[in-house]
Image: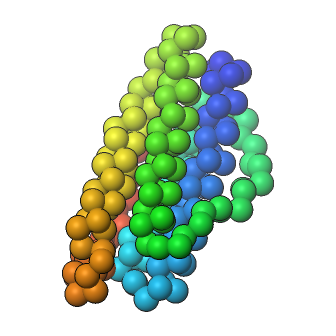
Amino acid sequence: MLNEKVAELLNTQINKEFYSAYLYLAFANYFSEEGLDGFANWYQIQAQEERDHALLFIQYMQNNDARVTYEAIDKPEFSAEQHMDVLEAGLKHERYVTGLINTIYGAAYEVKDFRTMQFLDWFVKEQGEEETNASDLIKKMKLFGTDPKSLYLLDQEMAARTYAAPSLVL
Ligand code: FEO
């Protein structure tokens, strides 16, 4: 039986993960319209990963007989006057999500919910990776984004990303 507050935070996280997927689909749209299909591919895959995260939270709650409820998903909001704005919005968003995961972890810790803490360990690591990826993209865009030939090559690198199912199995 999950603690009420922990269950509520887990349930909210489902919505946040779906929102993340929605936001990254919007990023993919932006890059697709800009003719950068590699970047669009990268964010499409990122959106798939976010959907996977949402499904993992659902599965975890169901495995623990907690009631799952779905709320409306917010409209993805970001302004992009240049490519870098999108990448920076991505990093900001991942930092925000890390904070959310830490808050759930803290609530689980308070009530000695070791099972939830162990479940969240995977997400703590995943958030570290996602923040690193987002910040690496910013560095690459700073280095190569202003030269069209380099940007073309960077876009090709982004096109090479392929989807992999999450390593966490519940
Ligand atoms: Fe589900 Fe990008 O964190």
Q: Position of residue 18 (x, y in %)?
A: 61, 55
Above or below residue 115? Residue 81 is below
Q: Quadrant of the C terminus?
A: top left
Q: Position of residue 2 (x, y in %)?
A: 63, 22
Depth check, front residue: 40 or 166: 40
Depth check, front residue: 167 or 154: 154
Q: Quadrant of the N terminus?
A: top right
For residue 29, what is the image quadrant?
A: bottom right
Q: Is residue 143 left or right of residue 34?
A: left
Asked if residue 45 can be seen in this view, the reply is no
Image point 52% across, 42% down: which residue? 97
Q: Position of residue 85 (x, y in %)?
A: 48, 64
Image point 47% across, 85% down: which residue? 34
Q: Is residue 93 left or right of residue 68?
A: left
Q: Position of residue 151 (x, y in %)?
A: 28, 80
Image point 48% across, 65% down: which residue? 86
Above or below residue 158? Residue 129 is above
In this figure, which colouring scheme has been used for the structure? Answer: rainbow
For residue 154, what is the image quadrant?
A: bottom left
Asked if residue 15 can be seen in this view, the reply is yes
Q: Is residue 28 left or right of residue 145?
A: right
Depth check, front residue: 162 or 155: 155
Depth check, front residue: 158 or 58: 158
Image point 60% across, 30% down: which residue? 64
Report the number of numbered marks: 0
Above or below residue 30? Residue 114 is above
